[in-house]
Image (cartoon, helix red, strand yellow):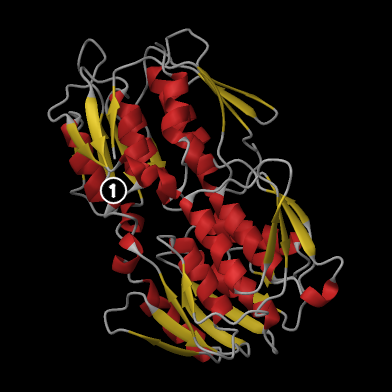
Amino acid sequence: MKETVYPSAVQGRIVAPASKSYAQRALAAALLVPVSDNPAGWSELRNMGLCNDTSAALDAVRRLGAEIRYGENRGTYYVEGGFLRRRPQELNIGESGLSARLFTPLAAQSPEPVTVTGHGSILKRPVASAMAEPLRRLGASVSFSGDGFLPLTVSGPLRGGTVEVDGSLSSQFITGLLMASPLSAEDTHLAVRRPKSVPYLAMTLEVLHAFGISAAHAADYTEFVIPGRQRYRAAVYNIEGDWSGASCLLVAGAVASLPGGEGVTVDNLNPGSLQADRAIVEALTRAGVPMDFCGRVLTVRRTEVLRAFEFDATDCPDLFPALAALAAFCGGTTVLRGTTRLTHKESDRAATIAAEFAKLGVEVDLSQADVMAVRGLTAPDGKLRVRDTSLDSHNDHRIAMATAVAALRADRAVVIDGAEAVNKSYPEFWNDLKNICLK
């Protein structure tokens, strides 16, 4: 699928998509509520949008025993637990890295083998090798091909115990262990080396608490103690708006709205959210972007001059594409740190940003270790000088969104190939973007 993006000013009001990170965690927690707890075994999940990743998680919880009913209100789902009421031989988690690392430890609680697989880019990401040894130490049987990729087959159950986990590349497997370990016969002690994306671990603990699970942890998230033989409790849970999906729309307001105009307003953003990508507000502030927060409504306006800034995105790597789009219009060179977190995303995201933004006339320097330096706009008319009108998402949803936003201030239209990649996290992105473009 191709999308043509024409130079345009933006203005208007939209609603942030639901957080897929919270939705996948809440679905897993609702699955783990014992079916014997009926009639209190049904959880109510509100404001849950269906992107590809959330749909994959929904399919996984069904296969693992949950019953699903759809509420009358849009986005409301009723989930009856009953973990392992059904014994699937296979779980297909699509292209979702979180679901791969979340549902593998859950599947490892099954006494019968379960194969976790997917399709597309997830099969090129070495997610299996990092999970195998910790799961074995906790009592699971694990097998996978020698290259470290999915598919991976596990069986258990996990017994608990003490295990060390590398947290330097992703927090998602730790999330899976945190959610599976309360079902183990013994307590589980997790020692985490070099934890990254710590806000996502805080999100997991928040969801666990909402569903009645306790877990102790060190202040720096390097140690966790999860008591065994716990019981999940059904809950009414509101899925908050997604700061990751909203980040590009906020940048659109910062760089492409009318100077002195109404800007872009995004609803359903929790200012106190534990989502790591709430840090986009700090980046916008450093760039000098005018903003107004009223409750859960954030309005971003454009100012005539944006300033280059420094920002460490180690704990929020999904912001890199949006940050590059913002930096493209800031005077001077913006320095973004944390690029080592980008290698095993849907694309080699740092290299992809450099390649695709170069087509828009934006210089992105990756010569320094763990650093992305973006040289801001120098054209006197405030427009990017497009060198190649054919852009490619590289099947990466965040690349598709960020290049579209940057192209709003280009000197001519561009065509983005692979535009359907946005379905992974934000299926309504193209409609929302068109609705705020001024005709």
Q: Is residue 402 above or below residue 231?
A: above
Q: Which residue is label 1 attached to?
A: 371
Q: Is residue 382 above or below residue 65?
A: above
Residue plotted at (21% across, 17% down): 411
Dot 1: element: strand
Q: Is residue 343 above or below residue 268?
A: below
Residue plotted at (70% across, 28% down): 295
Residue 71, image x and y in percent? 73, 48
Would you say residue 224 is visible in this rendering? Answer: yes
Label 1 packing within 10 angstroms: few (<14), some (14-19), many (20+) = some
Looking at the picture, tell me which residue is in the foreground, 102 or 36.
36
Q: Is residue 16 above or below residue 164?
A: above
Task: Say what amino acid the circle numbered 1 marks.
Answer: Val
Report the residue that reaches farthest toward the left: 387
Instruction: Give the left or right position of residue 437, taking residue 372 as reference.
Output: right
- Looking at the rendered structure, the number of numbered marks drawn on it comes to 1
Looking at the picture, tell me which residue is in the foreground, 152 or 128.
152
Q: Residue 431 falls in which quadrant of the image?
A: top left
Residue plotted at (52% across, 33% down): 281
Residue 277, image x and y in percent? 51, 44
Residue 424, image x and y in percent? 43, 50
Q: Quadrant of the N terminus?
A: top left
Instruction: Give the left or right position of residue 332, taking residue 438 as reference.
Output: left
Would you say residue 312 is visible in this rendering? Answer: no
Looking at the picture, tell me which residue is in the foreground, 100 or 406.
100
Instruction: Give the left or right position of residue 168, taking residue 7 as reference.
Output: right
